[in-house]
């Protein structure tokens, strides 16, 4: 018998065994499906019902890659995602033919000037440079992988002019001085893995003039890797500044304040995506994270809804004042706003007591999180474009706007959105998920599972192998630099020599009928319709 016949017989035997295995498996699953009591579909349609569950499980991927158009995806559309990636990867964000925005729909627009500023007229730091790696797109064939070249690139980092330096806590012993208006929002080590935090820290450090918020998970060695300025967030769980019994540890707070990179503290009252304490699943709480947070390893962490140290504005302000006096650095607070009433109360208390925060981080309800609950993420707290002007109005009304800086957060991932936030009252802007995308996030929505396939929102060492720090840190730096460049570009189009000069007059609102409203028109209408308690400016 020749070799061909032998191989044919072996092939038939293999196929026969596979068929027997398939039939036996099918019969077994048929009986299991018919007898199980959990799924009605499987009881009536054994085996066939499994196809339903399979397609249901891959539904998010199918919608993301095949069925959603470029502007439909949530939380971020494909266009949003690609704009972030292009800035981070190629250090530019140019596209052709025209916008995909629905110009018939209502929305905000930036008011352009008939006499925009020339590049040479812009007030900016032209001396400070940064060298990063960027990709050059050589060719993008339809059926093959795109051809790209990695190159070293030196560019301006587009910092504000020294005269436009933004100072937080100018009355503090150690004021926080900033020459960039875009920084990283709170993301804890534990929610993100050590490689992600390291890449972000080093990238932000390369970009200069920015900051990194530690999130409520405490200050880790990974936050310090890049030498970037840090805002240490203190949440109700007081992770990193507590003792073993969970009490606030003033000695530990003082030690943290002596770290050169630490420029400010932020007391977290609430977060847009979860107006309650934070949550981290047990599988994410490894021994190192437990040590940093001063909790037990491999046990779920739930922060209280609020601090036990205070229960009203006066006691909150006393707590903030004590931290400031104890450390000498500025102290802010992170809030979610629900109405003009509470914004007014906050501002009134600042005026009446002469105390309060050096900065207020206003987090919109559209903000992200590693883990939260649907009822909180969807319905509790106003989105940033509603909340931000309420805080700005209140601080101006009670004459304390000049003493408090405002940081805005909530999907402000592009220069035009940042410009609108600045025009609506912000001094600075925080970004979280945009930075996650720079280090590899692809929106699989697995943040709470510790199974992030790209190694970003996970502490699993095997999953983290996907994230190469020395490649991703350049993308983070490129994103910040390109965002600042774009912000100056928008300012120039509006006739401004610097983005620090954005005001309400630079944004207009177009309704569904085509009528336009200035921001002041909108707020005046709110006052007239809402009365003293709801919308005073």
Image (spheres, rainbow, N blue to C red):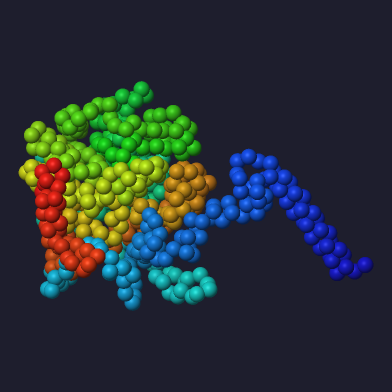
- Pick the residue in front: 170 or 491: 491
Q: Residue at x 33, y 60 (%)?
A: 478
Q: Residue at x 24, y 62 (%)?
A: 107
Q: Is residue 447 visible?
A: yes
Residue placed farthest to the right in the image?
1
- Pick the residue in front: 477 or 499: 499
Residue placed farthest to the bottom in the image?
97
Point out the image quarter for the N terminus. bottom right
The picture places residue 520, in percent across and down from the top left corner, at: 11, 57
Q: Is residue 156 visible?
A: no
Q: Residue at x 14, y 50 (%)?
A: 529
The picture places residue 237, in percent across and down from the top left corner, at: 33, 31
Q: Quadrant of residue 475?
A: bottom left
The picture places residue 362, in percent across and down from the top left corner, at: 23, 46
- Pick the residue in front: 55 or 427: 55
The picture places residue 246, in percent across and down from the top left corner, at: 34, 25
Q: Is residue 303 above or below residue 428?
A: above
Q: Residue at x 47, y 35 (%)?
A: 282
Left or right position of 262 against 519: right
How many marks overall? 0
Left or right position of 243 against 44: left
Q: Quadrant of residue 231?
A: top left
Q: Quadrant of residue 180?
A: bottom left
């Amino acid at each position: 018998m020749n070799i061909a016949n032998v191989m044919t017989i072996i092939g038939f035997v293999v196929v026969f065994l596979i068929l027997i295995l398939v039939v036996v498996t099918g019969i077994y699953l048929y009986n299991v499906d018919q007898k199980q009591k959990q799924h009605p579909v499987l009881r009536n349609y054994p085996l066939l019902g499994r196809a339903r569950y399979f397609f249901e499980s891959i539904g998010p991927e199918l919608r993301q890659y095949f069925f959603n158009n470029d502007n439909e995806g949530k939380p971020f559309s494909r266009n949003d995602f690609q704009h972030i990636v292009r800035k981070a990867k190629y250090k530019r964000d140019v596209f052709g033919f025209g916008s995909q925005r629905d110009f018939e729909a209502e929305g905000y627009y930036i008011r352009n000037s008939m006499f925009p500023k020339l590049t040479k007229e812009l007030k900016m730091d032209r001396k400070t440079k940064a060298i990063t790696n960027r990709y050059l797109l050589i060719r993008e064939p339809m059926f093959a992988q795109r051809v790209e070249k990695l190159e070293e690139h030196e560019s301006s980092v587009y910092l504000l002019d020294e005269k436009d330096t933004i100072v937080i806590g100018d009355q503090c012993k150690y004021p926080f001085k900033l020459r960039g208006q875009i920084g990283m929002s709170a993301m804890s080590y534990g929610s993100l893995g050590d490689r992600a935090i390291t890449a972000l820290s080093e990238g932000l450090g390369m970009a200069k003039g920015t900051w990194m918020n530690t999130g409520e998970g405490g200050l880790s060695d990974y936050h310090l890797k890049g030498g970037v300025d840090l805002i240490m967030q203190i949440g109700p769980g007081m992770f990193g500044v507590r003792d073993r019994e969970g009490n606030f540890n003033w000695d530990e707070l003082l030690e943290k304040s002596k770290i050169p990179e630490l420029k400010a503290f932020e007391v977290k009252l609430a977060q847009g995506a979860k107006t309650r304490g934070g949550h981290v699943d047990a599988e994410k709480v490894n021994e190192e994270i437990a040590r940093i947070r001063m909790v037990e390893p491999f046990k779920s962490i739930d922060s209280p809804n609020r601090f036990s140290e205070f229960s009203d504005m006066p006691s909150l302000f006393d707590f903030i004042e004590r931290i400031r006096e104890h450390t000498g650095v500025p102290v802010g607070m992170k809030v979610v706003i629900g109405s003009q009433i509470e914004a007014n109360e906050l501002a009134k208390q600042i005026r009446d007591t002469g105390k309060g925060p050096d900065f207020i981080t206003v987090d919109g309800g559209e903000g992200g999180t590693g883990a939260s609950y649907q009822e909180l993420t969807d319905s509790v707290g106003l989105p940033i474009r509603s909340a931000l002007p309420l805080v700005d109005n209140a601080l101006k009304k009670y004459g304390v706007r000049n003493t408090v800086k405002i940081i805005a957060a909530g999907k402000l991932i592009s220069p035009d959105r940042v410009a609108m936030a600045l025009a609506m009252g912000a001094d600075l802007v925080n970004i979280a998920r945009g930075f996650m995308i720079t280090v590899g996030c692809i929106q699989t929505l697995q943040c709470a599972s510790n199974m992030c396939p790209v190694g970003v929102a996970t502490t699993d060492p095997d999953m983290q192998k996907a994230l190469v720090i020395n490649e991703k840190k350049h993308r983070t730096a490129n994103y910040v630099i390109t965002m600042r460049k774009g912000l100056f570009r928008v300012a120039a189009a509006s006739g401004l020599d610097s983005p620090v000069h954005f005001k309400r007059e630079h944004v207009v609102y177009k309704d569904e009928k085509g009528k336009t409203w200035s921001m002041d028109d909108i707020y005046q209408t709110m006052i007239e319709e809402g009365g003293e308690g709801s919308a005073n400016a």
